[in-house]
């Protein structure tokens, strides 16, 4: 592996991370509704989920899931169902006051777990790694070491970008709360975003 290959990979990873997708929409929804701390704990969960995908891709489990239509469908629909469940809970929440703080340890743990589940049950992440990693691998060197390094690079840039999204989305949330009518619709907005993410995952193709 050389520096040019690593920088090229980083550039592609950043572009793909900032494109609208399930993970950044999930962070956006949590941060708008509950503030940047909620987004950061969600991000930590998502990045923990990335560790699962990186490990799976490195040892070949992702390829096995990809080749099995049944396994792929199970993961896909489980992820979609989980997101639609979160959407249902958001739509059912009739509270008009949404705190901008997320300092409660139980709430933070819940957000962290949601991030892990959401990322692990998104088969698109595995497909991404299977499609991207081989294009930057030098097969004259240790493939495993290179995949781990690329995976770590992807994880770090994802954490940085999602954290920036959390700060930005908190500002959006504060702006929305200046209008009482809009503030009452925050849960509906979050539910809508969760629905969009769930539908995107449900229609993910190999």
Image: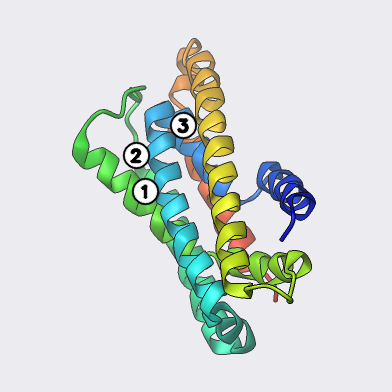
Q: CA distance from mark 1 to mark 3?
A: 17 Å
Image location of residue 47, percent across then percent down: 46, 51
Location of residue 46 with respect to 204 vertically, above or below? above
Location of residue 40 with respect to 174 vertically, above or below? below
Compare residues 90 and 83 and report the one nearer the observer: 83
Residue at image position (48%, 69%) is 55
Compare residues 85 and 153 and report the one nearer the observer: 153
Q: Are marks 1 and 3 in contact (CB under 8 Å)?
A: no
Label 3 residue SS = helix
Q: Give the label, 2 or 3, closer to the camera.
A: 3
Q: Are marks 1 and 2 in contact (CB under 8 Å)?
A: yes
Location of residue 100 with respect to 70 vertically, above or below? above
Instruction: Determine whether, in the image, residue 59 is placed left or right of residue 206.
Output: left
In this view of the protein, can residue 203 be seen by the observer? no
Q: Which residue is mark 3?
A: 31
Q: CA distance from mark 1 to mark 2?
A: 6 Å
Q: Earlier in the sequence, mark 2 or mark 3?
A: 3
Q: Are marks 2 and 3 in contact (CB under 8 Å)?
A: no
Q: Residue 93 bears which disc, if any? A: 2
Image location of residue 102, percent across then percent down: 30, 29
Q: Earlier in the sequence, mark 1 or mark 3?
A: 3
Image location of residue 101, percent across then percent down: 32, 23
Image location of residue 141, percent across then percent down: 68, 73
Label 1 residue SS = helix
Q: Which residue is mark 1?
A: 89
Compare residues 13 and 93 and report the one nearer the observer: 13
Q: CA distance from mark 2 to mark 3?
A: 17 Å
Quadrant into which the N terminus falls: bottom right
Quadrant for residue 104, please give it. Answer: top left
Q: Residues within 10 Å of mark 1 (few under 14, many from 20)?
A: some
Residue at image position (71%, 45%) is 19
């Amino acid at each position: 592996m050389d520096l040019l290959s690593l920088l090229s990979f980083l550039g592609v990873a950043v572009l793909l991370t900032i494109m609208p997708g399930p993970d950044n929409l999930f962070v956006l929804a949590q941060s708008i509704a509950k503030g940047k701390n909620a987004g950061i704990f969600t991000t930590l969960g998502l990045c923990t989920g990335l560790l699962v995908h990186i490990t799976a891709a490195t040892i070949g489990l992702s390829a096995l899931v990809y080749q099995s239509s049944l396994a792929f469908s199970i993961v896909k629909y489980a992820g979609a169902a989980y997101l639609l469940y979160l959407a249902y809970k958001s739509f059912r929440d009739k509270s008009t006051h949404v705190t901008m703080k997320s300092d409660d340890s139980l709430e933070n743990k819940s957000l962290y777990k949601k991030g892990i589940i959401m990322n692990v049950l998104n088969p698109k992440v595995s497909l991404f790694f299977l499609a991207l990693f081989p294009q930057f691998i030098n097969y004259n060197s240790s493939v495993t070491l290179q995949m781990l390094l690329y995976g770590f690079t992807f994880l770090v840039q994802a954490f940085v970008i999602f954290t920036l999204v959390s700060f930005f989305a908190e500002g959006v949330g504060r702006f929305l709360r200046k209008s009482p009518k809009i503030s009452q619709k925050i849960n509906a907005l979050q539910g809508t975003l969760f629905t969009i993410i769930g539908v995107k995952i449900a229609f993910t193709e190999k």
